[in-house]
Image (tube, rainbow, N blue to C red):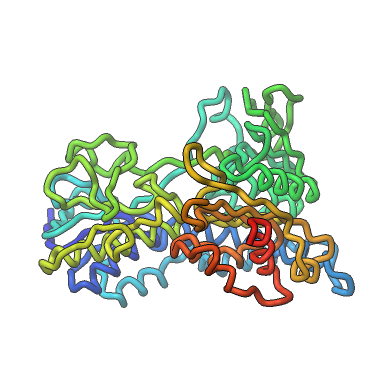
Amino acid sequence: MTEETYDVVVIGGGPVGENAADRAVRGGLKTALVDHERFGGECSFWACIPSKALLRPGNALAAARRLPGVPVGGALDPAAVFERRDAFIHNGDDSSQVEWAQGAGIDVVRGHARITGEREVTVDADRVLRARHAVVVCTGSVPKTPDIPGLNEIPVWGSREATSASEVPRRLGVLGGGVVGVEMAQAWARLGAEVQLIVAGARPLPHYPDFAGDLVADGLREDGVRVHLDSGLMKASEVDGGARLELKGGEPLTVDKLLVATGRRPTTDDIGLESVGLKPGSALTVDDTGVVSDVDGDWLYAAGDVTGRAPLTHQGKYAARAVGDVIAAKAAGRPVDDSPWSQYTSTADHYAVPQVVFTDPEVASVGVAAPEDGKPHRAVDIDIAVAGSALHADGYQGKARMVVDTEREVLVGVTFVGQDVADLLHSATIAVVGEVPLRRLWHAVPAFPTISEVWLRLLETYGL
């Protein structure tokens, strides 16, 4: 048994853990970063990066087809798409991530880490890392598997298999109408699979405005995806190397693979939470400075998916930067301002979480999706029908919504749906975070002819 002492020990070497460790080191603290898989984590190797690499070629081809005079081929080349994806994930080699961490002054430790006491982490049962100031948990999330008869007997993909496969299944079933479900349904349909999407509700993307789910469903159907709404998987069984799926209220389906995309849960099953009185498998409840509740001593922190607050890579990195700065400030004896919107708090988790669904059409949103009961909210919905969108693509189909606090006349939420609307999102995020008054926003004149002209139309429809 070996023992080492650090100022900070970070468990989880994905983007969130990297950011927490980096900020701690910048604050002058000796920091260890521990991971048992690949440094760079889920986003770099199995989620954000490879999924977007699979989606982008199909989106580009569809965009080209919407412009007359642009020579386009008939279909994607799956082998070329897979090769480009593999280049982005370095063929699963995390050497560059390790080199970055070491270059930033972070000590990289490979192995399975468990909390074994206050400010104590044991790696692979034979290496003890003691933290003078803090332990930070950034272990992310894993897919949730529903309890469905026969599901464990058929060829199933999780999100990792869906983003890393290098052969196109002839028939792919997708269970779940959330972000992973719709993105992977479209990606694999455009790569040549016959895709069946099984959605529990009346439309996919249930947490977005209805028009978002409806337009995405239309886009999936245009790519040949068969969308089963108000459905569900009742039973699965193996058949001829594939799977027979019995749907709620529908005819049986036969597929070669089934992607189960029914949500994720925090990865806290085996990190030693019981040693500090917490329940394994549960989310780590934190305050806005990242301190874990119900643990005495103000030494245990968490950021990212493991907290259940805003399960997005960019939001987790944002929280991790605050956590690293908080720990460094406390270690140096500096005061920590925990008021909203300070350097030391992740306030935006509550008010302004931006997210993009990279389907075609894209969905880009920030803040609240619809007026909330009991609040002075008004929603303004319009078609994205401006000169910029008409020039961008023939037959451009899109919608926009802004939700306004009518007492203060500031934006509290914005949603865009349409081709390439992701590039509109940061302006919306700035307006929401900055609480820019609508009458001042009126003076932010959108350039002509761009899709950003939709901002003018939204404000005009509101009444300015």
Q: Is residue 338 above or below residue 241?
A: below
Residue 91 placement (x, y as % from top left):
52, 65
Residue 98 placement (x, y as % from top left):
36, 69
Q: Quadrant of residue 402?
A: bottom right
Whether residue 65 is visible to the viewer of this picture, yes or no, is no
Left or right: 348 with respect to 420?
Answer: left
Whether residue 228 is visible to the viewer of this picture, yes or no, is yes
Viewer-side residue, 387 vs 230:
387
Q: Quadrant of the C terminus?
A: bottom right
Residue 318 placement (x, y as % from top left):
38, 62
Left or right: 172 with respect to 50?
Answer: right
Viewer-side residue, 35 vs 118:
118
Residue drawn at 86 percent across, 73 percent down? 71
Q: Quadrant of residue 52?
A: bottom right
Q: Is residue 31 above or below residue 245?
A: below
Q: Quadrant of residue 128?
A: bottom left
Residue drawn at 53 percent across, 69 percent down? 440
Viewer-side residue, 326 vs 372:
372
Left or right: 247 with respect to 112?
Answer: right
Callout count: 0
Residue drawn at 75 percent across, 50 percent down? 219
Viewer-side residue, 302 vs 17:
302
Residue 252 placement (x, y as % from top left):
74, 26
